[in-house]
Amino acid sequence: MVKKESKKKEVSKKLSASNSSGSWAFPLKDVVSAINITYDDYIRTLTPRLKLVDQFLVFLVVLGILQFIYVLLIGNFPFNAFLGGFISCVGQFVLTVSLRLQYNLDTTNTSEEEIASKDTDSDSIAKTEELSGSESKLTSQVTPERAFGDYIFASLILHFTVYHFIN
Amino acid sequence: MVTSKPQEKLFGVRVETIRSLLRVIIFISIAGAAISSRLFSVIRYESIIHEFDPWFNFRATKYLVTHSFYDFLNWFDDRTWYPLGRVTGGTLYPGLMVTSGVIWHILREKLALPVDIRNICVMLAPAFSGLTAIATYFLTKEMKDSNAGLLAAIFMGIAPGYISRSVAGSYDNEAISITLLMATFYFWIKAMKLGSIYFATLTALFYFYMVSAWGGYVFITNIIPLHVFVLLIMGRYSHRLYTAYSTWYALGTLASMQIPFVGFLPIRSNDHMAALGVFGLLQLFSFGFYVKSKVTGKQFRNFLVFSSIFVSFLGVSALFALTALGWIAPWTGRFYSLWDTNYAKIHIPIIASVSEHQPTAWPAFFFDTNMLIWLFPAGVYLCFQELRDEHVFIIIYSVLGSYFAGVMVRLMLTLTPIICVSAAIALSKMFDVYMNLVDVLKSNGEDNSEETGSGKKSKAKRPSTNDKLFSIVSKLAVLLSFAFYLVYFVLHCTWVTSNAYSSPSVVLASRGPDGSSSIIDDYREAYYWLRMNTPEDAKVMAWWDYGYQIGGMADRTTLVDNNTWNNTHIATVGKAMCSSEEVAYDILKKHDVDYVLVIFGGLLGYSGDDLNKFLWMVRISEGIWPEEVHERDFFSDKGLYKVDGEASKTMKDSLMYKMSYYRFTDLFGGRDGIDRVRNQAIPLSQSPKLNVLDEAFTTQNWLVRIYKVKDLDNVGRDLHSATKFDESANDMKRKRIIKKPALDLRE
């Protein structure tokens, strides 16, 4: 059901996109440039702390993919062991992303506002901007130390259950 | 009681201190009200486990406290589902038993209070209802303010819709799981609001507790993703949402797989796929958001189109492929019956035969929630007006809850909390507006003083004074009428609780013609007889409703019980009950049955007896043996369900009919017997004869009748001729002796 909805949305988007740009080669170039810009920007805003976090994220992704390949090649006999390993990767990944988001909040907020001020035609962006404004007010109470403490707490519970799960 | 607001005065103490003190006092009194209103059943009857399912939970708890925890998880029960047995440890939700086991150990070892485990089981539901009220307070406080929270707490404490499942003695999974439901929702709202990993982890922990306690956890598994999904569609993505949901899903899913009964379901069954889908969607959204913050609008749009086509194609094809490969189980029958109310009736008679799976009747809503049911839409409307993220949650919950409550009676339970919360929001909003007498009085007083100061000459001011007066009067009228409603609500709740929901249904109360009340204790009489007079490994066959009670009270092996995991086995019992003696004897012997137990309410006028459930037995066994059992054969020629002279031959030959009416006419001294449930006469001439069973015991009011299955004949005759020979030998001289049960044994 979820997929269907997103598909519907995407169809309507496609219509508007094809209206704005005639051919298909054009958007593809756009996509590539979008990725490039994002990458450049990412490199630009990287701090040592974030770099450490990101290296950890990449490590987790690689670990997860390795486990998945193992299952595809050799079989999933101790299924709960595989699940435990895989979910611990995924869980640690989302936890770390959450941590990164909380660290990184100020910079994204400012850049978001910049972008939002650029195109004012869609009201949804204005709304999200409004929301992210209130969000920064709320999460400014979450100091990096507090965020890290929460992160440790959640990770401990995650790994305790994983440990229990794989016996 | 609830609306007592501290005055903004300082009695030498800070207002906040007074306020929190008052709040604590109010909490204590709410918890007191919630607990005490659930004690009717203990006061009227005794401290006893109610109904059917609680007897199993009680038996499992006793097993837990007498064995180790690992024994409990690996428990293979060979005393039920004879001869199959049941892997009990792997097929139950252990949360309830573990909770009471832990409480028992703490009381015994830490506090040196040796309490009987039965009393803990009886009192667990009321104690947890107090906690539910507090959890509801916090949830509603997140929605509006603490005034609404207090109102919601007291509503939750005494609303009959919740009391129906949590009176003292109804030791069922729902007793603790509603508390956990409210706590999970509270932490979810909190996590979503603050974007805190800490609260999301707490949500996951309470979710785990909920999974361990009740199959209804699927409700949470679907409502939280739905909430997130709706927020995404509304364009309300935020990093807080990402943090809260991802943390909850990753931890909660992993934790829920620790319960043996749930196992790998969270990644295998379709019921849980929505949560996974939203989890994936959220990852994409967060990535998209990141990209969006870097590039211009048009580029982003193209990027979005490209990636969303790719991803949705991948996702849909993966879902189809996995379902086709059989990795993901298709929807279960109970799930279908939620959407199509006729599904169960057609395909799974065993689900339809349970009375609490029937659709809810309209008056039940009013009966269970009284005034809250018409405040409920108002509260939802107020949520629409404000429409913060958490209000979306209330709206989704109320829509889903109303639908499910309409489909199944027992799901009224999940609707009740949200009714309480939104009714409290509506009522407290109204009080906010109308309680504001202070301003009016103050300005009015000033007006009056001005008036007296300036004399009576100004007539222009009169109308404004009148306006003030009118506004005061109207406010007072509204407030008083609502005060009346609230008082009436409390009265209604008390009345409903004491009259409708406090009966243990193991012990029945009746009133004689002179108004004197008497207790009918036939069930326990029969079970006690079984416990004392039959060998310990005797197998008792009864309809599945009584399986848990026989296991719990009589401690004898049963063929089928309320777990209903094996439809064929139940159908076998149904077939034995509805076929003729020869066929039935074969089945009984093959299953080593020693005793057969039937419930017969014909003498007492107890309508929930086996003859009234008989058609379900026929239907269920017809589902397995369509060529041997036909429902039509059990109706009279006119198509009516008759037990009197017009009853069909198949009906009269069926074992159930014979066991129910065997020697029934003897009670009426040479006249026709009158069945008081069905209001039909059993003709004396057609009094059934039993050849393969011996009557072993019949209780005082004939409510429970127990028969012993005869052994094969010593000299190889078939049992018909043997019985005939015995009868002629005895020359029909045997007299029936109705013994009074030795009641003093029990006391």
Image: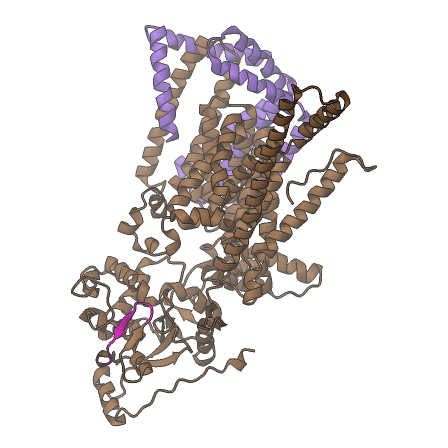
Chain colours: A purple, B brown
Looking at the image, can residue A66 be seen?
no
Magenta segment: does it hold B681?
Answer: yes
- Image position of A32 with respect to B53: above or below: above
Residue extent of the magenta highlight: B676-684
* Residue B704 coordinates in the image, percent (x, y): 39, 73
- Image position of B663 with respect to B201: above or below: below
Kindly give the residue lying farthest to the left in the view shown: B637
Magenta segment: does it hold A158?
Answer: no
Left or right: where B452 falls relative to B284? right
> The N terminus of chain A lies in which quarter of the figure?
top left
Residue at position x 29%, y 47% from top? B342
Residue at position x 22%, y 75% from top? B582
* Residue B188 coordinates in the image, percent (x, y): 56, 36
* Residue B179 coordinates in the image, percent (x, y): 56, 47
Q: What is the quadrant of residue A51 in the picture?
A: top right
Which is more toward the observer, B11 or B443?
B443
Looking at the image, can residue B402 be seen?
yes
Number of numbered tags placed on the structure image: 0
Which is more toward the observer, B250 or B588?
B588
Which is more toward the observer, B83 or A8?
A8
Left or right: where B684 falls relative to B477? left
Q: What is the quadrant of residue B726 in the picture?
A: bottom left
* Residue B330 coordinates in the image, percent (x, y): 34, 42
Left or right: where B187 falls relative to B640? right
